[in-house]
Amino acid sequence: ELVEMIRQHPKLERHLFWLEAIDDDYLEAVYAASACLIAASYGEGFGLPLVEAARHKLPILARDIPAFREVAGSHASYFSGLGPVDLADAVLQWLERAKAGYTISSEGMPWLTWAQATQAMLKVVLDDQWQDRWVPQKDDTLVARYWGSDPRLFTEVGERTGTALWSTGQAGHLLYGPYLSLPPGRYVATLTGKVGIAGVNGVIADVCIDGGKEILADCVLQGSWPEQEQTLARLEFTLTRPAQQLEVRVETQEMSDIAIAMLEIRRADGLPTPQLPPATRTAKEAEPVLAYWATHPKLASPIGYAAGRTLYSTAKTGYLLRGPHAALPAGRYVVRIYGGMQGDGQVRADVCISQDTQILVERVLSGEATKGRDGVLVAMEFELRWYVSDLEVRIDVLKTSDIMLNGCRVYAGHGEIVYSMDAQKSSTREVSDSLETENEKQEEMK
């Protein structure tokens, strides 16, 4: 499938070159004619191209993954991120540094010949000369510890990504297991992880035995975006008799946007009961009534490129994002769309109902790099005079638009109304005409 995509790519032999089945002499010539090796692999097993680049004294720009760090160390430049813009920004920054003469040299990077590598392996196997040794760490309270993606933790609706288990926009059990046998005593189960842009939205965790017939502890997960890894739940429970098949369960809703990074179960007999902090009055943002990350299954993207939970434009004209066709009662609302935009390409955002025939509010974005406070690309206020069942948020882009989307949230809002249900009526065809006309003008100018 990948080979077919490359062979049919419109940029093939123009900006995309695939050197298929070349010999060693040709490869040597390529290295000699290159300015930098870009190692963008996400699942690299060893990193042989980095060694080849160092042998040719070629600078290296590599994805920041453990395999590349182990091979190149401080002899390479690194970048992170899964989206096209992340790699593009890294290349542009490297070119700027190259002009100023500040690139990191790969000279001096240690590497072994095949003969040396073979001898090192023989010393490990025959002479017990290991590079590292794992030493058990004593922890008297630890009963069990699992990555979120551990196969001993089961899932109905989750997606295993790296060491974490992510929600997928479906309601159901994100996690259940590991079915432990434990003696009587006090225990605490701790779930750590991350919260995405759509928020927790009613995720419930519990500890149970006997196939869920007896629940020992339960709670609603707590966490906030965009904080990094955090404690999502702490479940204290007591076993009065030996337990078989003990499990921890996490149940998500459609809008729940969380990742379970780790589950720990510890003995709590000697642990003090944690004291809650004193109550304080702090400003807290209201919870959204609707919230979705950009690649949520309730949102469609006819022309976008999905990288994880982020969506990118692809030099095509049309709807980059539309959805979720959700139901809302009458009231005032604010929709916030999160992301960033660069360049001169025009982008239109709107909120519509009645099968796309009634536009409640729209906003045209253009200009240089646009990114609002807290990552808000645009905020629009609207009013519903009656219950609707098909509210939709849309992002319309041009070929020249360079935009990334992280997601959207709809809040129950108050204040000045920009548009209301009877303020503007037009069809989908009429609304998109302005952007298409602008695109035609740009093509004529070219």
Image: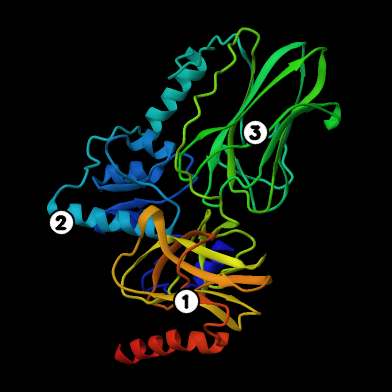
Is the residue marked by circle 2 packed among few (<14), some (14-19), or many (20+) residues within 10 Å?
Answer: few
User: Can you identify the residue that label 3 sits on?
Assistant: 150
Dividing the picture into quarters, in which one does residue 117 lie? top left
Which residue is at a point 36% across and 76% down the rendered structure image?
345
- Spot occupied by residue 113 in the image (x, y as percentages of width and height): 36, 34
What is the quadrant of the C terminus in the image?
bottom left
- Can you tell which of label 1 and label 3 is closer to the viewer? 1
Kindly state the secondary structure of the residue where label 1 is placed: strand
Tell me whether circle 1 and circle 2 mark residues in contact (CB < 8 Å).
no
Q: Amino acid at mark 2?
A: Lys
Q: Is residue 353 shown above or below 442?
A: above
User: Whole-Å distance between the Cαs marked 3 and 2?
Assistant: 46 Å
Q: Residue flagged by tag 1: what amino acid is it?
A: Glu
Which residue is at 49% across, 25% downward?
278
Quick one: 392 or 23, which is closer to the camera?
A: 392
Mark 3 crowd level (few <14, some 14–19, many ≥20, 10 Å Cα): some
The label number, if any, that marks residue 99 in the structure image: 2
Spot occupied by residue 380 in the image (x, y as percentages of width and height): 46, 68
| Kind of residue sitting beneath label 3 | Asp
Q: Is residue 267 left or right of residue 340?
A: right
216 vs 301, left or right, is right
